[in-house]
Each structure stands twice: as C-alpha cells, then as structure tokens.
C-alpha cells in the first residue's frame, strides 16, 4: 500500500468535491434538486468527518485495484478509475435513482462527481511510484 498516494488522492477527492458542489459549479442545482440549503447546518462537522473516512476507504480500495492491474502510470490509473466509476459506482447509483424517483439531473451531478473522483484518485495512485 502506498499510504502517501492514498492520503493525497483522498484529499484531492475532497477538494474536487468542494469545487464540484460549490455555487460556481453544481452546488445550486444540487441544493435545488435535493431541497437543501447550501453551506452549514446542524451536524455538518460529523458529516464532513464521515466524508473524510469515506474518501480514505475509497482511496484504499482504489490503491488495491491499481496495484492488482499493474497500472503504473497516471493514465493507466485514471483508466482504472473510469472503469470503477462507470462500471460500479454510477450503475449502483442509477438503481437508486430508478427506485426512489429522484431526478436524472441529480443522478448526473452525483454520479459525475463520484466517477470523476475515482478517475482522479486512480490517476494519482497510478502515477505515484
């Protein structure tokens, strides 16, 4: 396990999320579609702590996939992330969308972030020696 690459990729995924869900990107649409407000609220500290844990779990799993596929470059790691995003993450989210009746646009925002996050994590882990 490359712990430094895992930490860096988890932090990168969180930074990507802050940008993705900002007011300048998809935050306003996400808030409207989920009927939530942007910004703080009660219990946001605990939510962010869980997001950090989640990012590290994803980075550890990504490290495992990148190592097992011998993806020793940023491009190869990104490709692993793309396959994980489009092959595992997005389809499982799509089932939830179908059964809960959530809007397709919300699926595109959330699955888009998750897939891009997997690509970034895979690229970082694949690139790191």
Image: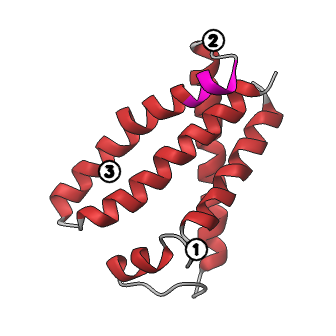
Residue 109: x percent and y percent? 40, 61
Residue at 61%, 86% in the rendered image = 40
Tell me where the magenta segment starts and ends, as one range.
73-78
Residue at 32%, 50% in the rendered image = 93
* 10 Å crowding of disc 2: few (<14), some (14-19), many (20+): few
Q: Work out whether 39 lies above or below 82.
A: below
Residues at marks 1 and 2 touching, judged by CB atoms closer than 8 Å: no
Residue at 62%, 66% in the rendered image = 19
First of labels 2, 3 by sequence position: 2
- Helix, strand or loop under label 1: loop
Q: Pointer 3: what residue?
A: 93
Residue at 53%, 84% in the rendered image = 38
Question: How far apart in space, not on screen, are marks 1 and 2 (Cα)?
Answer: 35 Å
- Helix, strand or loop under label 2: loop
Residues at marks 1 and 3 touching, judged by CB atoms closer than 8 Å: no
Q: Pointer 1: what residue?
A: 22
Residues at marks 2 and 3 touching, judged by CB atoms closer than 8 Å: no
Depth check, mark 1 against mark 3: the one in front is 1
Q: How is the image coloured?
A: secondary structure
Q: Pointer 2: what residue?
A: 70
């Amino acid at each position: 396990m490359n712990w430094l690459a895992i930490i860096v990729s988890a932090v990168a995924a969180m930074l990507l999320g802050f940008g993705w869900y900002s007011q300048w990107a998809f935050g306003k649409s996400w808030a409207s579609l989920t009927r939530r407000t942007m910004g703080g609220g009660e219990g946001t500290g605990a939510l962010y702590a869980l997001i950090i844990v989640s990012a590290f779990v994803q980075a550890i799993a990504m490290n495992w996939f990148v190592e097992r596929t011998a993806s020793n470059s940023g491009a190869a790691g990104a490709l692993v992330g793309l396959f994980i995003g489009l092959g595992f993450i997005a389809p499982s989210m799509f089932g939830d969308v179908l059964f809960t009746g959530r809007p397709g646009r919300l699926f595109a925002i959330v699955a888009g972030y998750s897939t891009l996050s997997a690509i970034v994590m895979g690229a970082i882990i694949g690139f790191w020696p």
